Image (cartoon, rainbow, N blue to C red):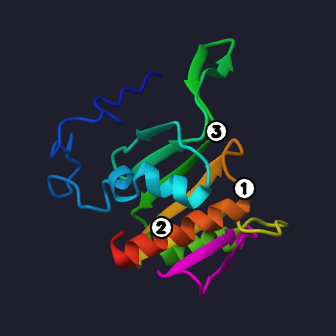
Amino acid sequence: MAITFTGAGCGGPAGDSGPTTGKKAGKSEMEQVCKYFPKELMEEAIGKPIVKVEDSSMVEDFVCIYYTAWIDDFNHSPYSGDSPGGPHVIVVLKDESVAAGKADLEGDGYTFKKDESYSWDNYLVTSRGGKTPYRADLIVNENRYFMIKSNHFAATDEEIVKIGKRFSERMKNGK
């Protein structure tokens, strides 16, 4: 089975929103996740360099990937060969009910806790049996939120909390 995503993740000219999906043409400021939360803001929050930023927005979600390392043969498979990648922090603007998503994960043993030191409405998510939050969610409205998490140990749980806090300041103050 082959799946083709024409233009997915392509950084077209300014103002080019790519294929439309029934949503308004063009992207809002928040939907341009990599611009809304620029590399420099991530570096400030995480305290380490970001070596590559990739807009991986798909049909519904708006995604930015911040790589802390880039390796040409990161994903090795005997079936598809080597492909580049690396440890990264992923920020996704999710268009789904916050309450429904929370209820689904709580049913699987995840816990959600608000951090009052954040400048923006939020949840810190801890997995079942976990002692520290592995994910920070910044709530835009009841049906939209930013999900921030680390893959391949790009950031510690403590660093994810710091990123969420710094990004919440950007959301409140615009910088």
Query: Would you call the spot at circle 2 few (<14 residues within 10 Å), some (14-19), or many (20 or more)?
Result: many
Q: Position of residue 140 (x, y in %)?
A: 39, 74
Q: Judge from the rendering whether residue 67 lies leftward or rightward of residue 35; answer left or right.
A: right
Which of the pair 61/86 is nearer the observer?
86
The image position of residue 85, as x and y in percent, is 57, 29
Q: Secondary structure at mark 1?
A: loop
Q: Quadrant of residue 134?
A: bottom right
User: For mark 3, what is the residue?
Assistant: 87
Considering only vertical position in the picture, is 66 above or below 146? above
The residue sitting at 37% across, 43% down in the picture is 58
Residue 96 versus residue 154 in the image, above or below: below
Residue identifier under label 2: 167
Q: Mark 2 and mark 1: span between their CA atoms? A: 16 Å
**How far apart in space, not on screen, are marks 3 and 1 (Cα)?**
11 Å
Q: Is residue 120 magenta?
A: yes
Task: Give, as a three-letter code, the residue at label 3.
Answer: Pro
User: Residue 119: within the magenta?
Assistant: yes
User: Residue at the location (41% across, 41% down)?
Assistant: 56
Q: Along the line of sight, which residue is nearer the eye, 149 or 163? A: 163
Q: Position of residue 109 (x, y in %)?
A: 76, 70
Q: Which residues are magenta?
A: 107-125
Q: Which mark is residue 156?
A: 1
Q: Amino acid at mark 2?
A: Phe
In the picture provided, is 167 more to the left or to the right than 143? right
Is there a contact, CB below 8 Å, between mark 2 and mark 1?
Answer: no
Which quarter of the rendering shows the C terminus?
bottom left
Foreground residue, 47 or 92?
47
Determine the image quadrant of residue 36. Answer: bottom left
Q: Amino acid at mark 1?
A: Thr
Q: Earlier in the sequence, mark 2 or mark 1?
A: 1
